[in-house]
Image (tube, rainbow, N blue to C red):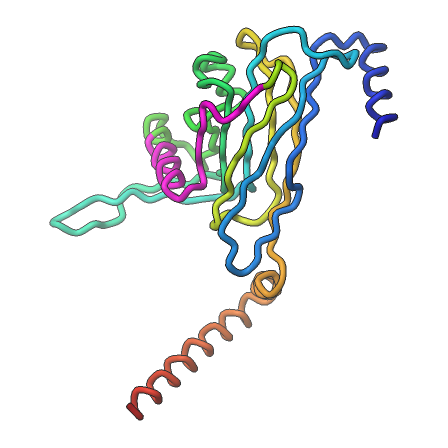
């Protein structure tokens, strides 16, 4: 590890690298989801250094973005017609992160302008979704806001404008909670160091969320044998219903 760090510093010096470098780390590179999983908390920490290994000699802000696996999603609006809620307009997005959290040392709007925030997705207001087919910009903004609001209520989207602490302009850390309903898969933690509205360094780390034990066996079986899994689920439901009926018959 020490040799690799020295080699990296030597390479940066030879190539004339002038911008600081980020050295990120995550408290857990693997989160195991077992029966009774109630969520966990990830600690994202690291340091920012000059190319020669010295402490960064400038003030900077840190923004951390933790993003879960992307998935296609269709959103439907509900309208109340004659006192009944019915499905109205809908739209589909090609890829939407199943989890999205942003933590920063200050409010993002005080750190960068809207253009930079949009490029790096530094906040829920700048989440970039890819709609399927053509869609009116105002309609897209409405559905995006609806998705963000829905997943905020589920604890899957969040933003903490003071969630990153920086010590002596060298060490930083942020704590981000993963709720019990997170999707399994590979999560990416991106860290950005920003000075005077400009991203001067960035780095990423990965976290794998996976099921273990009996839950993993069930999930793998359902993926590999979907039809058989469906039949077994129906048979189990019928069997439980029959047993409940028999029990009540004897009471």
Q: Is residue 85 above or below residue 147?
A: below
Q: Position of residue 15 (x, y in %)?
A: 82, 10
In the image, is 77 to the left or to the right of 1? left
Closest to the observer: 5 or 74?
5
Residue at 80%, 14% in the rendered image:
12
**Left or right of residue 148, residue 201 in this image:** right
Outermost front residue: 168
As drawn, 73 above or below 249? above
The residue lying at 34 percent from left, 42 percent from top is: 90
- Residue 37 coordinates in the image, percent (x, y): 52, 54
Was residue 54 drawn as part of the magenta stretch in this picture? no
91 in relation to 229, above or below = above
Quarter assignment of residue 4: top right
Q: Is residue 15 above or below residue 216?
A: above
Q: Nearer the viewer, residue 224 or 54?
A: 54
The count of marks equals 0
Q: Is residue 160 magenta?
A: yes
Quarter of the figure with the C terminus? bottom left
Quadrant the N terminus occupies: top right
Q: Residue 14's x, y, as percent? A: 85, 10
In the rendered structure, the answer to whether residue 107 lies left or right of residue 40 reads left
Q: Quadrant of residue 244?
A: bottom left
Residue that protrudes farthest toward the bottom in the picture: 250
In this view, the residue in front, 107 or 89, is 107
Q: Which residues are magenta?
A: 142-166
Q: Residue 140 location in percent, x, y? A: 37, 31
């Amino acid at each position: 590890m020490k040799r690799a760090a020295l080699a990296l510093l030597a390479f940066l010096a030879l190539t004339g690298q002038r911008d600081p470098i980020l050295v990120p780390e995550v408290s857990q590179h693997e989160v195991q989801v077992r029966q009774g999983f109630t969520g966990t908390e990830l600690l994202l920490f690291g340091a920012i250094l000059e190319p020669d290994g010295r402490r960064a000699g400038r003030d900077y802000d840190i923004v951390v973005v933790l993003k879960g696996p992307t998935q296609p999603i269709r959103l439907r609006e509900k309208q109340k017609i004659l006192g009944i809620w019915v499905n109205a307009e809908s739209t589909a997005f090609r890829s939407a992160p199943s989890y999205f959290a942003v933590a920063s040392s200050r409010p993002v709007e005080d750190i960068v302008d809207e253009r930079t925030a949009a490029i790096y997705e530094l906040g829920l207001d700048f989440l970039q979704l890819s709609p399927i087919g053509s869609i009116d910009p105002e309609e897209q903004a409405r559905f995006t806001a609806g998705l963000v609001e829905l997943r905020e209520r589920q604890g899957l989207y969040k933003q903490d404008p003071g969630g990153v602490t920086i010590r002596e302009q060298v060490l930083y850390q942020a704590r981000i909670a993963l709720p019990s309903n997170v999707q399994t898969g590979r999560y990416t933690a991106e860290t950005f160091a920003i000075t005077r509205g400009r991203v001067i360094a960035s780095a990423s780390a990965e976290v794998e969320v996976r099921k273990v034990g009996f839950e993993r066996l069930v999930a793998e079986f359902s993926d590999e044998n979907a039809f058989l899994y469906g039949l077994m689920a129906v048979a189990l439901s019928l069997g439980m219903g029959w047993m409940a009926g028999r029990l009540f018959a004897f009471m």
